[in-house]
Amino acid sequence: MNPVFRKVRHIWPCICPQSVTVDTRQYKGMPTHTIGKWKYLLPKEAPKKKKDKQQMKQVVMATQTAYGTLNVKVSGFDMTLVEHYAQYIHRLCDRLSVSVTESYALPTKTTEVSLMQDQGTKMFVDAVLKTHKRVVQVHLSNPLPSLHLSLSP
């Protein structure tokens, strides 16, 4: 150890009393120079644009030689089964070269099943059923869609 530090170490307890109390903040007037701030390092983001209202596609009406747009609605209580069956219909239409116009989900509907006691007026919730729906829009330009419809299970 350096001899100067040894002397300071021995003198230090004599200079400072054991308990030092400070009532004011010593650093009050010192600026922090934006220590800990990092937002200025990121590139400026463009303001978010408002989404345009979704435009509905026109449904093609049926004529003498071709059927129009066909909505295939899939609904059920198990979301995975509904999703997989809608996916199956979409892939089947792709294999049969039938154009799929759109595929989308409808909002989930919740239904509560309540039971009433034999000798009472209170209703007890027995089950909560969630109904999931998917829609696959298929454009049938083929004059023989009955063949396509008979192939699906």
Image (cartoon, rainbow, N blue to C red):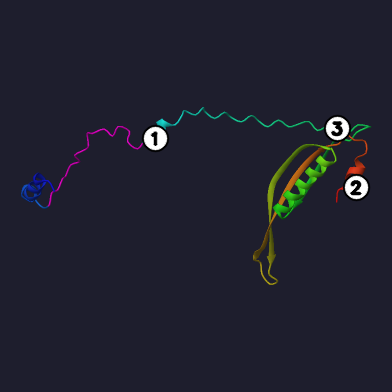
Q: Which residues are magenta?
A: 19-36
Front disc: 2 or 3:
2
**Of 83 and 7, the residue lying toward us:** 7
**SS label for mark 3:** loop
Task: Classify 10 Å Cα crowding around label 3: few (below 14), some (14-19), many (20 and above).
Answer: few
Label 3 and label 1: CA atoms lie apart by 58 Å
- Identify the mark nearer the N-term, 2 or 3: 3
Q: Local crowd at mark 1 within 10 Å, few (<14), some, or many (≥20)?
A: few
Label 1: which residue?
38
Q: Residue 7's x, y, as percent? A: 7, 47
Q: Which residue is mark 3?
A: 61
Residue 25 location, x and y as percent? 20, 41
Q: Main secondary structure of the magenta part?
A: loop
Question: Foreground mark, 3 or 1?
Answer: 1
- Find residue 150 and name its label: 2
Q: Nearer the viewer, residue 33 or 59?
A: 33
Q: Residue at x 71, y 44 (%)?
A: 106
Q: Quick check: marks 3 and 1 in contact, CB under 8 Å?
A: no
Percent across and percent down for residue 67 are 89, 35
Tag 3: amino acid: Met
Q: Are marks 2 and 1 in contact (CB under 8 Å)?
A: no
Residue at 77% in and 42% down = 136
Task: Give whichever of discs 3 and 1 has the lower sequence position.
Answer: 1
Tag 1 or tag 2, which sits nearer the N-term?
1
